[in-house]
Amino acid sequence: ESDVEKKPRRIKLDFATFQGGSLVNDLQLRDFTINAMAINVHQPQQLIDPTGGARDLLEKRLRVCSPKSLTNDPLRTLRAVRMALAFDLQIMPETVQLMREAARQLEQVSPERLRDELFRILEGCNPRTGIEILERIGALKQVLPELVELKGVQQSAPHIHDVWTHTLLVLDGSERRFHTYWARGASFREVQDDGTIAPTAAGGSIPFGMAWNRDTLLYVTGSARTVAISL
């Protein structure tokens, strides 16, 4: 029997009042059709699906509930990218166009919300594709304008790519390496007050992993070199 005390599983319930006056109207105000389904607790076999989310889910499509879904909350533009990558969904052309339009309003979103959604994209599968999609729809210049400015910046030999392409390749390679080390048992560790990575349970150093403090993401490579990205 393990000596580690098992913490009780926490279940989080989120309650909200109707925004649209009725359940159907409320569902139509949601972001994407696959998130706009409900059931009646007294008739659980009956699916309430006013926007066709079940069909979209089966056919792996990501589609907004209404033309105003993204302008009502521009952060949903980043959420669309994350969900498409996480669940291997095809973003419908009309939704892509709405994403481009809503991306111009991302400056109205609080930095904290943008940070959290961006981190979810970087933590997920294929973060390079996520960054490329954000760039193509015009969202990246609102979230990380410094990255867009890397385009066309040439490097001295032996580099053969500009800094933008080089950065994408590093992100692509880092994602593969991260999951490789993660599969070998690496884990997330907290950054200590002095800026160092917290030791492992055995007291040794972490060969690979990621760690967070309040405003910095630390990425620790296999060679123990650390890159800090201030946020």
Image: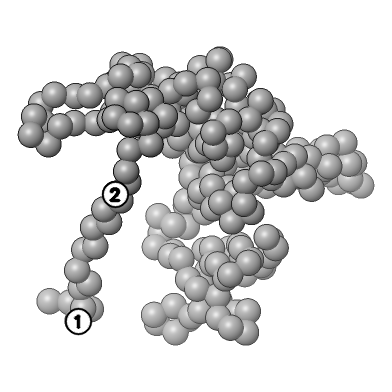
Task: Find residue 231 and name its label.
Answer: none
Circles 1 and 2: CB atoms closer than 8 Å? no
The residue indicated by pointer 1 is 3
Q: Earlier in the sequence, mark 1 or mark 2?
A: 1
Q: Residues within 10 Å of mark 1 (few under 14, many from 20)?
A: few
Q: Amino acid at mark 2?
A: Phe
* Image quadrant in which you'd find residue 104: top right
SS category of the residue bearing label 1: loop
**69 up-or-down from 183: above or below:** above
Residue 174 visible in the snapshot: no
Residue located 47% across and 71% down the image: 189
With respect to residue 166, does 69 lie above or below? above
Looking at the picture, tell me which residue is in the foreground, 59 or 185.
59
Q: Single out the residue that lies furthest toward the left.
A: 42
Q: How are the colours assigned in the image?
A: one colour
**Residue appearing at x 33%, y 38% in the figure:** 18
Q: Nearer the viewer, mark 1 or mark 2?
A: 2
Task: Say above or below: 67 vs 221.
Answer: above
Quadrant for the N terminus in the image:
bottom left
| Above or below: residue 117 compared with residue 8 | above
Distance from label 1 to label 2 (Cα)? 37 Å
Residue nearer the viewer, 83 or 42: 42
Foreground residue among 185 and 62: 62
- Disc 1 marks a residue whose amino acid type is Asp
Residue 224 position, x and y percent, is 62, 69
Identify the residue position indicated by label 2 in the image: 15
Residue at the spot 23% in from the left edge and 58% down from the top edge: 11
